[in-house]
Image: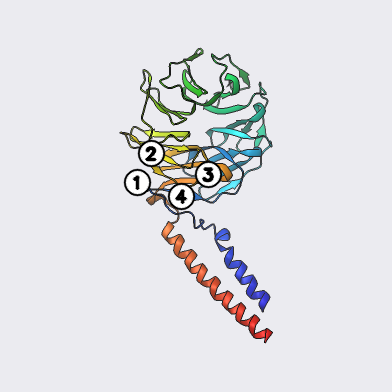
């Protein structure tokens, strides 16, 4: 009987994992009235460097030692990887076509069924990849490395800088940006050229809303593209901003290496939430009020409106409270039986 009771106790302890109930830490952080930053269950403990979503029910994250995980609309699950190299960036054309890049010039491709290794024209670390379509895309890396996909293969392209490029965002086949260590460069359809920048600080991430609106962030720095030039926008923190994702004139988010989330409301940036002390390294907004951030230690944070949350944090709390009561009850029975048998 004692073995049965112990088995029941262990079952109760693992009910959350069996049923996919979010962890107790998945409580809303301070933010807007209708949006929460929620720590999400992660299937890995590896550092995660990039997250990109295809839609609300499909997305990818890559990280250390070839780690690849996928969002299926309900949870993040691990996916077989063809490499053990660190993967630093992923970009999806659609659900059946995508690319990831990383250490040593590593390039892998998703073909709709599996990730496979792909020939790379460089052995230099690739930090960011941005696909325009099935037949056109770019990747950037250390020492100013630039490579382009033409539908059949990747090839190196001459660039205007020898500085490391950390991030890129392509608007179209004729327009795109990359930023890095004290440098901003632009693709004009024919060549990459150095562009005047309003800050000397390192820039870690760039995202373009459209040809006339874009953002870049970095070491306590935020700059915005107006369609004519880049200008400094006041940052509410001196922390290192590692990633930015803006979906409209009035909605955008950025994350820092101290676990802070900033929000753009159309008039200014403010500290919005601090859901973790782990470094957050990448952020992607699916739409206004819905997105994901990832970082060190397998950290995954979901930014979601209360209407979209699959489970209510309050409901989760009461589920755990009920489980705790059940565990205490079963434990009491076990203790009493052990005590009775010993006497």
Between marks 3 and 4 in the image, the one whose residue lies nearer the viewer: 3
Q: Is residue 15 visible?
A: yes
Regarding residue 289, the answer to whether it shows in the image is no
Work out how far the residue at label 4 is from the one at label 1, CA to CA, in angstroms. Answer: 13 Å
Q: Which residue is mark 2?
A: 263
Instruction: Please identify, in this view, whether the residue under mark 3 or under mark 2 is nearer the observer.
Output: 3
Closer to the chain start, of discs 4 and 2, is 4
Q: Please, what secondary structure does the residue beneath circle 3 have?
A: loop
**Counting other residues with Cα less than 10 Å from the Cα at mark 4, is it few (<14), some (14-19), or many (20 or more)?**
many
Is 40 or 274 nearer to us in this picture? Answer: 274
Pointer 3 residue: 278
Q: Which residue is mark 1?
A: 32
Quadrant that contains the N terminus: bottom right
Q: For numbered disc 4, what is the local secondary structure?
A: strand
- How much space separates mark 3 and mark 4, taking CA atoms? 14 Å
Residues under numbered marks 1 and 2 in contact, where contact means CB atoms less than 8 Å apart: yes
- Left or right of 299? Residue 29 is left
In the image, residue 334 sits, relative to residue 78, either above or below, namely below
Q: What residue did someone put label 4 on?
A: 38
Q: Is residue 313 left or right of residue 127?
A: left
Image quarter for residue 142?
top right
Foreground pick, 173 / 296: 296
Residue 50 x %, y %: 54, 36
Question: Does label 3 or label 4 sit earlier along the sequence?
Answer: 4
């Amino acid at each position: 009987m004692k073995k049965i009771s112990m088995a029941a106790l262990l079952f109760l302890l693992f009910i959350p994992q069996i049923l996919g109930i979010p962890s107790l830490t998945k409580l809303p952080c301070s933010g807007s009235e209708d949006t929460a930053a929620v720590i999400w269950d992660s299937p890995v403990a590896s550092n995660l460097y990039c997250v990109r979503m295809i839609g609300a029910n499909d997305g990818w994250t890559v990280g250390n030692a070839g780690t690849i995980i996928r969002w299926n609309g309900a949870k993040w699950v691990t996916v077989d990887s063809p490499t053990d190299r660190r993967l630093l960036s992923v970009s999806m054309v659609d659900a059946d076509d995508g690319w990831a890049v990383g250490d040593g010039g590593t390039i892998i491709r998703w073909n709709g069924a599996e990730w496979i290794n792909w020939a790379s024209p460089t052995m230099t670390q690739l930090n960011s990849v941005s696909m325009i379509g099935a037949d056109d895309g770019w990747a950037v890396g250390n020492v100013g490395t630039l490579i382009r996909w033409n539908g059949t293969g990747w090839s190196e392209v001459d660039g205007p800088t020898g500085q490391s490029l950390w991030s890129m965002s392509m608007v179209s086949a004729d327009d795109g940006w990359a930023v890095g260590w004290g440098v901003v460069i632009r693709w004009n359809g024919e060549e990459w050229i150095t562009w005047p920048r309003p800050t000397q600080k390192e820039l870690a991430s760039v995202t373009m809303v459209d040809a006339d609106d874009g953002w870049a962030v970095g070491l306590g720095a935020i700059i915005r593209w107006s369609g004519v030039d880049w200008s400094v926008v006041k940052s509410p923190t001196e922390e290192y901003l590692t990633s930015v994702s803006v979906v409209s004139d009035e909605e955008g988010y950025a994350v820092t290496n101290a676990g802070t989330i900033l929000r753009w409301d159309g008039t200014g940036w403010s500290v919005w939430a601090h859901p973790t002390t782990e470094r957050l390294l990448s952020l992607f907004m699916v739409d206004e009020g819905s997105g994901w951030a990832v970082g060190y230690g397998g950290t995954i944070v979901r930014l979601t409106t209360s209407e979209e949350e699959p489970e209510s944090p309050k409901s989760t709390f009461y589920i755990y409270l009920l489980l705790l009561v059940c565990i205490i009850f079963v434990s009491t029975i076990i203790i009493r039986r052990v005590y009775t048998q010993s006497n």
